[in-house]
Image (cartoon, rainbow, N blue to C red):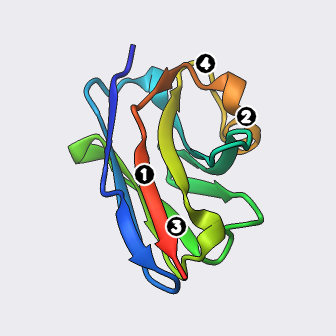
Amino acid sequence: QVQLVESGGGSVQAGGSLRLSCAASRYSYSANCMGWFRQSPGKEREGVANIWTVDGSAYYADSVKGRFTVSQDNAKKTVYLQMNSLNSEDSAMYYCAAAANVWSRSICGRAREFDFGSWGQGAQVTVSS
């Protein structure tokens, strides 16, 4: 099972930027689809972005499209989430996740929370207005 460790969370003012990192302890072909999710108190966990690590194809939730960018560094076994133009609605605990049983780019783009079997511990992002 892939073990994931997030870092880079913190507090920022509205309009600012943060970059989250997700380091995988074991990077295998079974983790070709990686995702970022977030959860605020009292709300359900929502998908933010997925990335097909084979070719870097990225998919975004409408709420973050144009502001967030997901990328990868396969040599470092790390996936990143660059977050720009942050607002208070982006405040949440952010989790990265790996989907071991997703085998195509198109399925990765549609992958939901239940498709991801490995999860990190989370990184808190707080945006103040």
Amino acid type, label 1: Gln
Question: Closer to us: mark 3 or mark 1?
Answer: 1
In percent of width and height, residue 21 lies at 33, 52
Q: Which residue is mark 1?
A: 124
Distance from the alpha carbon under mark 1 to that under mark 4: 28 Å
Q: Is residue 64 above or below residue 119?
A: below
Instruction: Measuring from the top left, give residue 32's x and y in whole percent.
Output: 50, 33
Mark in the foreground, 4 or 2: 2
- For badge 3, the amino acid type reads Thr
Give left or right: position of 19 versus 95.
left
Where disc 2 sits, the SS reads loop
| Disc ID at residue 112 | 2
The first of marks 3 and 1 along the sequence is 3
Q: Local crowd at mark 4 within 10 Å, few (<14), some, or many (≥20)?
A: some
> What residue is disc 4 on?
101
- Residue nearer the viewer, 55 or 14: 14
Q: Compare marks 2 and 1 and give the one earlier in the sequence.
A: 2
Q: Residues within 10 Å of mark 2 (few under 14, many from 20)?
A: some
